[in-house]
Each structure stands twice: as C-alpha cells, then as structure tokens.
Image: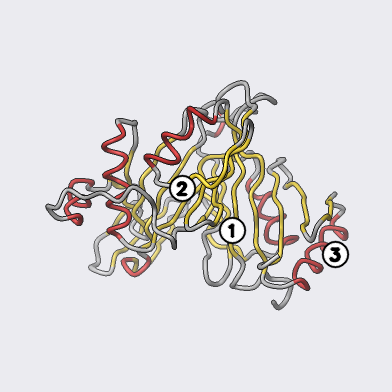
C-alpha cells in the first residue's frame, strides 16, 4: 500500500442480500446460477463454491427490490473461462427464467434476477479484446476492439454461439467452478461523485471510469465497486422492508491496511464499528460494507 491506496490483492468477499423467501430464491442461486448450498437455517442460507461463501441470503424482506430503486443493481460472479460462462448460459436457458446477455467487449455477461429483485451478473472478463477507449464531450464512450471495430459495449451477446463452446455432448455442469469469485458489485446511485469521493478518498480504492457510469477498484482489478445514474429522475428510494443489499465485504491484504482505513474514516468523520477484526461502515448513500483482513 502506498499513498493511501489499497493494495492490488484487495478483493471482494461474501455479499449479503435480503430476500423475501429463501426457498423461492434457491432455484435461481443454486440451480440456475450454479452455486452450492453451504448451509441453511430458517432465516439464512450461505451459497458458494468449493466451501467458500460468495452469497449469503437473509430472509425477512417484505417486498421485492423495486426496479430503478437506489441501491443494488447487481452483484457479479466472475468465471475464468468462456466454457464456464457457456455452462451458466445453458443452465439459465434450461431454467426457463427470463435472462439477458450482453457483450461489453471487455467482458461477456449473463444477467438474471432472483424472485426478490436482486440483480445477478455472471461474467467472463475479456480485457484483451479492448484496444482503446474513446470518450466524446457528451460523455458517450466508444470502445475500439483490437481489430479496429467500434463498439458501444452494450451489444447483445450471441448466446447460440456461446453454447457451441459446449460441443455436442449435451453435458452441462450443475455448479460453478471452484475458482468462481465475486468480481464486482454495482449500485444505482443518486450522487456517484459523492460516492467516489468516499471510496477513493477515504477507503483508498483507485478511480477508474467517471463519466456516464462510475467505478473504482485496484491496480489489478479496476472495476470492483461501480455506480450508475441511468435511472436519472426515475430513481427512487427503496422501502425500508425491501429486498436488496444488506452488506458487501472488502477483503484487505494486511492488518495495517485495515488500521489505515479506520484512521481515514475517523479523520473524515465517518461512523464505523470494529469487532472481531472486522470494520463495519456505510457509504454516503447508506450502502453497508464490512472490511476484513485476508485469512481472518
């Protein structure tokens, strides 16, 4: 760590979500997305890969997260091969759920929501396809591929071509691979500039894109925490009893980093709590996060 920036090893840990009914949510998270159920009781269910929790569902919400509500847009589970993404596409297709697929040039993504309105992205990173990023004065971005072609980054993904990566065996993996991970979290925001000032100036993330969408991360993963204002005047505050983000986890590389973050929070006048080696706080729009040290 230098100059108050978080180390490149910083990554995201388990994301905790509020849902109306865990039983109704499991066919999406377990069967379609492909997470393994790690444990469940009457009010909480942990799901993940290879014994590692990625998503924790908390029952108790009374209403689904409304569309265009401030807060969670989606949580992104990343896979490391295109074939893994193809297996996910096959599971989604077989599930009968409504889903979408987009080619962002720097990634290929599948999108679905659980019954409580929590958005889910399954993502395969393809940064090697990007040659240049050009931003117009009005903030519109054009992505230039390595072959010279121009893209919006919002083109539909050819799912039929993706599924051909599975060949003709008909076999579809029921579960995500052991190396799947939470790659980023994306929120709808009222004031992304204020949020960026917090995540960059106080927590220590590195700024990345700051135009029609805003994001920050580390030198290794620049797109880790993102915000958008696409709903504009239609954005509304979610009801207090709505589903959505309960908290997400940021895993730091060392204890001195956590201590430095606590010091910066104190200097900025941001309330926080410390217990069991974890630091809990909320960003300026009320999105809660927990910061912990790897291995604790």
Mark 2 lies on a secondary structure that is strand
Q: Which of the two marks, 3 or 2, is nearer to us in this view?
A: 2
Q: Residues within 10 Å of mark 1 (few under 14, many from 20)?
A: many
Q: Where residue 59 sits in the image (x, y, percent)?
A: 62, 30
Q: Are marks 3 and 1 in contact (CB under 8 Å)?
A: no
Task: Return the disc, 3 or 1, that comes first in the chain's sequence.
Answer: 1
Mark 3 lies on a secondary structure that is helix
- Answer above or below: position of 20 versus 206: above
Instruction: Look at 62% across and 67% down and name the residue there.
Output: 10
- Answer above or below: position of 285 versus 143: above
Q: Which residue does the numbered mark 3 point to in the structure image?
A: 263
Q: Where residue 31 sits in the image (x, y, percent)?
A: 38, 39
Q: Which residue does the numbered mark 1 point to in the structure image?
A: 12
Question: In terms of image quadrants, where is residue 166?
Answer: bottom left
Q: Where residue 220 sits in the image (x, y, percent)?
A: 53, 71
Q: How is the image coloured?
A: secondary structure
Question: In terms of image quadrants, where is residue 90?
Answer: top left
Instruction: Look at 23% across and 46% down and name the residue there.
Output: 159
Instruction: Give the Cα distance between marks 3 and 2.
Output: 38 Å
Q: Which residue does the numbered mark 2 point to in the structure image?
A: 36
Question: In terms of image quadrants, where is residue 13?
Answer: bottom right
């Amino acid at each position: 760590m230098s100059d108050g920036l978080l180390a490149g090893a910083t990554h995201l840990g388990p994301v905790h979500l509020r849902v109306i009914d865990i039983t109704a949510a499991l066919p999406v998270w377990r069967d379609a997305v492909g997470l393994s159920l790690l444990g469940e009781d009457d009010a909480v269910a942990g799901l993940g890969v290879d014994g590692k929790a990625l998503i924790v569902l908390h029952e108790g919400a009374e209403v689904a997260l409304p569309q265009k509500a401030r807060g969670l847009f989606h949580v992104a589970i990343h896979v490391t091969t295109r074939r893994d993404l193809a297996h996910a596409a096959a599971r989604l297709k077989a599930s009968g759920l409504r889903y979408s697929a987009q080619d962002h040039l720097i990634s290929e993504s599948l999108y679905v929501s659980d019954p409580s309105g929590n958005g889910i992205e399954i993502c395969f990173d393809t940064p090697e396809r990007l040659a240049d990023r050009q931003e117009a004065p009005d903030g519109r971005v054009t992505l230039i591929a390595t072959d010279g072609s121009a893209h919006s980054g919002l083109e539909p993904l050819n799912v039929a071509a993706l599924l051909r990566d599975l060949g003709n065996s008909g076999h579809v993996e029921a579960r995500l691979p052991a190396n799947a991970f939470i790659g980023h979290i994306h929120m709808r925001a009222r004031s992304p500039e204020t949020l960026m000032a917090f995540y960059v100036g106080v927590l220590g993330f590195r700024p990345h894109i700051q135009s029609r969408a805003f994001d920050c991360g580390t030198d290794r993963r620049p797109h880790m925490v993102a915000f958008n204002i696409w709903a504009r005047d239609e954005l509304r505050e979610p009801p207090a009893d709505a589903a959505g983000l309960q908290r997400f986890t940021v895993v730091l590389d060392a204890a001195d980093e956590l201590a430095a973050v606590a010091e910066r929070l104190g200097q900025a006048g941001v309330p926080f709590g410390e217990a069991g080696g974890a630091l809990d706080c909320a960003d300026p729009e009320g999105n809660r996060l927990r910061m912990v040290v790897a291995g604790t």
